[in-house]
C-alpha cells in the first residue's frame, strides 16, 4: 500500500515542499510511481524507497560527478605538466644556446682587443723604423755631401751631370742643323724652281 506526501514527510522528517521537490527532480516519477486516491496523491512502495534513498542517490551522483571532474582535472594537469616539461626543456636548450653565443661574443671581443693592441704595437714599431730611416737618410746625405766636398770639381757628381746635359744639348742642336740643310736641299729641287 502507498503513502501520502504528508505521511512520507513525517516519516522522513522532511517538509512537504522538500518531498514535492524530490518528486519533481526525478524523471517520470509522477507517471510511474504516483496515483490519486480520493483527494490525496499516494506514492507506491517503490517510489517511497526511491524518495527515501534520494539523498543517498544524490550523494552517489555527486560523488560520481566529482570523480569524473577530478579525473578530467587530473588529465588536464598531466597535459599541463607535460607542456610545462616541454617548455622547461626548451628553455634549457635556449639558455645553453645563449650561453654559447655569449662565450663566442666574449671570445670575439677579446680577439678584437688583442688585434687592436697588436696594431698599436705595430704602428709604434713602424714609427720607430721611420724615425730610424729618416735619421739614416739624413746621415747618408751628410756623408755624401762630405765626400763631394772632398772631391775635385771635375769629378763631383753634379759636375758630371752638367757635362752630360751639355753634351745632350749639343747633339740635339747639331741634329736640328742637319735637318735644316736637308730641308733646304729638298726645296731647291722642287719643280717650280725651274721656271
Image (cartoon, rainbow, N blue to C red):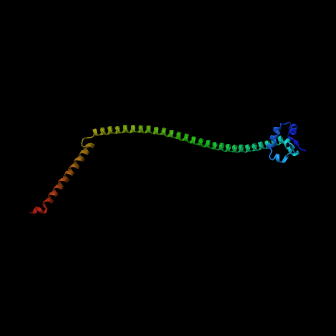
Location of residue 86 (image quadrant): top right
Residue lying furthest left? 195
Q: Residue at x 24, y 47 (%)?
A: 165
Residue lying furthest right? 1
The residue lying toward the viewer, choosing from 84 and 178, is 84
Q: Across the whole image, how many numbered discs are drawn on residues?
A: 0
Q: Quadrant of the C terminus?
A: bottom left
The residue lying toward the viewer, choosing from 173 and 11, is 11
Location of residue 90 (image quadrant): top right
The residue lying toward the viewer, choosing from 15 and 74, is 15
Return the x and y of residue 129 as percentages of the image width and height: 41, 39
Return the x and y of residue 109 as percentages of the image width and height: 53, 39
Is residue 20 in sight in this rendering?
A: yes
Q: Quadrant of the N terminus?
A: top right
Asked whether, in this view, residue 113 is left or right of residue 56, the answer is left
- Classify 171 as above or below 105: below
Is residue 60 in sight in this rendering?
A: no
Residue lying furthest front? 38
Asked whether, in this view, residue 147 is left or right of residue 118, the answer is left
Q: Residue at x 26, y 45 (%)?
A: 161
The residue lying toward the viewer, choosing from 9 and 152, is 9
Asked whether, in this view, residue 52 is left or right of residue 81, the answer is right
Return the x and y of residue 55 as percentages of the image width and height: 83, 40
Q: Residue at x 87, y 37 (%)?
A: 10
Asked whether, in this view, residue 69 is left or right of residue 182, the answer is right
Return the x and y of residue 179 as percentages of the image width and height: 18, 55
Amino acid at each position: 500500500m502507498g503513502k501520502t506526501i504528508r505521511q512520507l514527510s513525517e516519516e522522513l522528517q522532511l517538509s512537504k515542499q522538500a518531498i514535492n521537490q524530490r518528486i519533481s527532480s526525478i524523471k517520470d516519477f509522477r507517471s510511474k510511481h504516483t496515483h490519486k486516491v480520493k483527494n490525496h496523491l499516494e506514492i507506491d512502495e517503490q517510489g517511497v524507497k526511491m524518495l527515501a534513498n534520494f539523498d543517498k542517490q544524490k550523494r552517489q551522483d555527486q560523488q560520481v560527478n566529482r570523480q569524473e571532474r577530478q579525473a578530467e582535472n587530473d588529465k588536464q594537469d598531466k597535459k599541463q605538466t607535460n607542456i610545462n616539461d616541454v617548455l622547461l626543456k626548451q628553455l634549457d636548450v635556449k639558455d645553453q644556446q645563449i650561453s654559447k653565443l655569449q662565450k663566442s661574443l666574449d671570445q670575439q671581443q677579446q680577439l678584437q682587443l688583442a688585434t687592436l693592441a697588436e696594431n698599436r704595437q705595430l704602428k709604434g714599431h713602424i714609427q720607430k723604423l721611420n724615425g730610424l730611416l729618416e735619421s739614416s737618410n739624413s746621415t747618408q746625405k751628410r756623408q755624401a755631401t762630405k765626400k763631394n766636398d772632398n772631391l775635385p770639381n771635375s769629378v763631383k757628381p753634379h759636375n758630371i751631370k752638367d757635362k752630360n746635359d751639355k753634351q745632350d744639348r749639343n747633339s740635339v742642336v747639331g741634329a736640328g742643323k742637319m735637318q735644316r740643310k736637308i730641308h733646304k736641299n729638298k726645296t731647291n729641287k722642287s719643280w717650280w724652281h725651274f721656271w
